């Protein structure tokens, strides 16, 4: 069994209104040293698969098919024994 920790973020060229709003709010709260914010998603998936290579392939497919929109987002993940 493996634990996949998946990060999904917007591609650099994509506008991030949520990040902009968070950045402005942080500034109003006195955190004026924050230059910019990019928002994203984080997932933890437990994969019941004995082989690391197979688990890795499945997580990549999940990201490509559902967890990330390949047009505007990119993803990365770490896989560790669970």
Image (cartoon, helix red, strand yellow):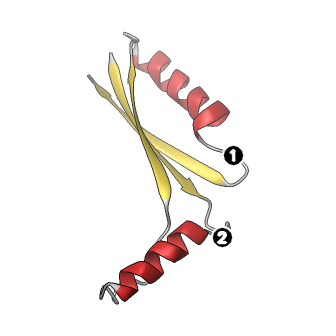
Q: Is residue 76 left or right of residue 33?
A: right
**Image position, residue 26 (x, y; %):** 37, 80
Identify which residue is drawn at 61% across, 42% down: 68
Q: Which residue is mark 1?
A: 70
Say if 46 sits above or below 42 in the image.
above
Q: Quadrant of residue 60?
A: top right
- Separation of marks 1 and 2 at Cα, in angstroms: 15 Å
Above-or-below relation of 62 to 34: above
Upstream in sequence: badge 1 or badge 2: 2
Q: Residue at x 51, y 28 (%)?
A: 59
The tag on residue 80 is none
Q: Number of labelled discs?
A: 2
- In the displayed structure, does residue 70 sit left or right of residue 24? right
Which residue carries the number 2 mark? 15
Instruction: Tell me the residue at 46%/82% (across/down).
Output: 24
The structure residue drawn at horizontal position 67% and vertical position 45%, both measured from the top left corner, is 69
Q: Position of residue 6 (x, y in %)?
A: 44, 40
């Amino acid at each position: 069994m493996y634990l996949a920790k998946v990060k999904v973020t917007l591609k650099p060229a994509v506008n991030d209104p949520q990040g902009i709003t968070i950045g402005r709010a942080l500034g109003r709260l006195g955190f004026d040293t924050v230059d910019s914010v990019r928002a994203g998603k984080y997932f933890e998936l437990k994969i019941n698969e004995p082989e690391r290579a197979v688990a890795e392939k499945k997580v990549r497919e999940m990201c490509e098919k559902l967890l990330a929109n390949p047009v505007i987002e990119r993803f990365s993940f770490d896989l560790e024994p669970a």
